[in-house]
Amino acid sequence: MTRQALLFIWGQWCEASDRGVREIRSPHDGSLIASVPEATLTDALAAIESARFSFDAGLFTSWSYSERAKLVGRIADLLERDAEMIAISESHDTGKRIVEARFDLTDVIAVFRYYAELGANLNGRNVDVGRNEIKSEIVYEPVGVASLIGPWNYPLLQASWKVAPALVAGCSFILKPSELTPSSAIHLIRILDEAGVPKGVANLILGSGAVVGFPLTSDPRVDMVSFTGGLATGKTIMGAAAQTVKKIALELGGKNPNIIFADADLAAAIDNAVTAGFLHSGQVCSAGTRLLVEREIHDQVVSAIVERARAIRLGGPNDQEAQTGPLISQAHRAKVETYIASAIAEGAKLRAGGGRPSEENLRDGWYLEPTVLDECKTEMNCVQDESFGPVITVETFDTEAEAIQLGNDTIYGLSGAVWTSDHDRAQRVARALRHGTIWINDYGPYRPEAEWGGFKASGTGRELGPSGLFEYLEAKHIWTNLNPAKSGWFPETSVGEKP
Ligand code: TXE
């Protein structure tokens, strides 16, 4: 495979400064997909300088909001044109089925369209201070240079939640996708360049968190860090960013309670519980991997989920019959396997899965069977820790108060669901759960218009919705006195002089 210039710095495609490369391997069968530059510290610093220079020179901030919004709309058009090609490459990087990658691309395009529309209508506001000679305005200005660091589970979708609002706001940025899944970010940057994003505004760094992560999150020339990934890395980034008091937006996953009451539509609840836990093999920040079931329906619900879990067909991106794919890497599968073994050691009862599939064609990939762990207790590590794999833990409750208490008994607070036919109870539980998104009698939908983010250790800040744009903006208050007058606070006489 030939070495390619795939870092993008100051409007130029380039190799890594030490010509280093990283091999990208298929999670489905370990085959070589691509060889991409592995950025060095020098490359990261050059990308930061590029973004800083473009921002300070006003290359993009001189555009109006509506001009930038129009550009973001053009990017949506180009993404639509290239959607199939990008979906294919993303399905190869992540191992997910092509149909899922296509859904993701539809969502990506919707995010760019939403922010194009929001940007076109973005206005400051006037504050009425009750004095005719005073004009008091709030204007919104870009935060500055942003480091946008993404994960591997939904590579382009997570990038779109950051890049689209950053562009509308007028920020310059350095995008760093996960080192495991770089392809779709490369496509995106090509499109940004084609659409006419000014030189230096969009920069692409491919590389490991250990090498390029620190400069991107600590360099004083960076004003903001937006990060989606794991809790441990989020804490490291928060610490690095604190040294220069950067603005931060963090989405750090969750351990999301999916609460089923006995009066729920059980057919719908069971079906959605299977999707919530096993979609993309559980590699979803909002995965419903913590099932809370009312005691009287426990056996019925868990038996049905176990049966459904055992029937899920695993397979690679091009397997038309597959229902979900592999885990992202060998290391990640090993981590989930350790999590399952520890759960069993803690007393959880293995009801389904727990091992690698036996099919010959899946042997070289990072597959893991959909797993159900029953008889879990809140204090167990398997209930408290995010596995980020195809593993549902089951707990039982007797009362509404207990369901709420259990649903909140977690350091995380990203999302959760409640299933019941009692409307009042649904509302009470939804209000009482301390998570950023609550679904009632549903699981998983999100909209570009609706804020997404976490309470507690699930992060800080919000993506999507108007808040997702305001993360990239600073509010500035401009006070104009149209009839200047003395303040009269201190007397004008000097010391010793009689007033
Ligand atoms: O994530 P990391 P990993 C969770 C999930 C998973 C765990 C670890 O529980 O098991 O995180 O996954 C970059 N400075 N989620 O190790 O390390 C890294 O290069 C700056 C939840 O894959 O968080 C990549 O681009 N950047 C999640 C990105 O951070 C650093 C999605 C994510 O990697 C860095 C993925 C550093 N010091 C995993 N270290 C979600 N919220 O959806 C690493 N990176």
Image: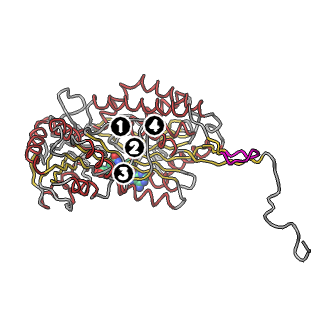
Which residue corresponds to the image point at 37% horizontal and 31% vertical from the top-left? Answer: 107
Compared across the picture, whether 333 is left or right of 50 comes to: left
Residue 49 located within the stretch drawn in magenta: no
Residue tagged 1: 446
Look at the numbered disc 3 and say if its residue's Cβ is closer than 8 Å to ligand 1.
yes
Structural distance between the alpha carbons of marks 4 and 3: 28 Å
Look at the numbered disc 1 and say if its residue's Cβ is closer than 8 Å to ligand 1.
no
Magenta span? 128-136
Compared across the picture, whether 424 is left or right of 123 comes to: left
Residue tagged 2: 452
Q: Quadrant of the C terminus?
A: bottom right
91 or 99, nearer to the observer: 99
Which residue corresponds to the image point at 12% horizontal and 43% vertical from the top-left? Answer: 301
Mark 2 or mark 4, earlier in chain:
4
Foreground mark, 2 or 3, reads: 2
Any part of residue 210 in sight: no
Foreground mark, 4 or 3, reads: 3
Q: Tag 4's secondary structure? A: loop
Q: Tag 1's secondary structure? A: loop
Mark 3 or mark 1, earlier in chain:
3
- Give the image quarter of residue 100: top left
Q: Amino acid at mark 2?
A: Trp
Foreground mark, 3 or 1, reads: 1
Foreground mark, 2 or 4, reads: 2
Residue tagged 3: 252
Residue tagged 4: 6
Q: Amino acid at mark 3?
A: Leu
Structural distance between the alpha carbons of marks 3 and 1: 17 Å
